[in-house]
Amino acid sequence: MTFLGVQSTSYQVENLSWKASGFGDEYHPGITLDISKFTAGTHFPNGYIPSGTVLGKVTASGLYGPYNDAASDGTQTAAGLLIASVRVTQASGTNATRVSSGLMIRGDVIQANMPFSGATTGAIDANGKADLLANGNLVRFE
């Protein structure tokens, strides 16, 4: 006889208010996030990294972390935005070490509605906007 125990699952309600339009929604390259680059209390206090987080590519591993203009590991160059919120904290309470998602490299963004602002890593700044343009990405900010 098989026993089916009680399980619970939590979900993140997606907040896409940072997306100004559907422009660019046809292509989002797959990426893998290096969760060790994110701070639990800042980037995923509820267990999810929110969509709209600005990401940079870690040179040594090819994985992605939050954009940080002051870094020197590759994440100092903005590569795009996290297209969908991703769950980091497992049902067991432990955090994943890597999580897959997609990278927004084209689209219109309402900067005031992005999940992070100011000096927080994962927020956009003037250098990050320049990085996106220099990489051939077409991300427009309102």
Image (cartoon, rainbow, N blue to C red):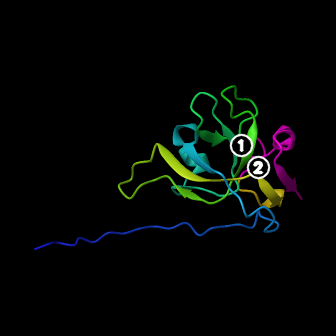
In this picture, which residue range is highlighted in magenta? 116-142
Q: Which residue is mark 1?
A: 120
Residue 117: in magenta span = yes
- Identified by mark 2, the residue type is Ser
Residue 53 at x, y percent in the picture: 69, 51
User: Residue 30, percent across and down?
Assistant: 61, 51
Q: Which residue is mark 2?
A: 117
44 lies above or below 71: below
Instruction: Please give the name of the residue rendered at 59% of the width and 70% of the height, measured from the top-left corner.
Output: 13
Asked where in the image residue 3 lies, by quadrant, the reply is: bottom left
Rendering coords of residue 12 (x, y %): 55, 66
Left or right of 142? Residue 106 is left
Residue 109 drawn in magenta: no
Disc 1 marks a residue whose amino acid type is Thr
Q: Which residue is at a point 27% across and 72% down the rendered structure image?
A: 6
| On screen, residue 76 above or below 125 | above
Q: Marks 1 and 2, Cα distance to the nearest angstrom?
A: 6 Å
Q: Nearer the viewer, residue 128 or 24?
A: 24
| Quadrant where the image shows the C terminus | bottom right
Q: Answer with left or right where residue 49 lies relative to residue 138.
A: left
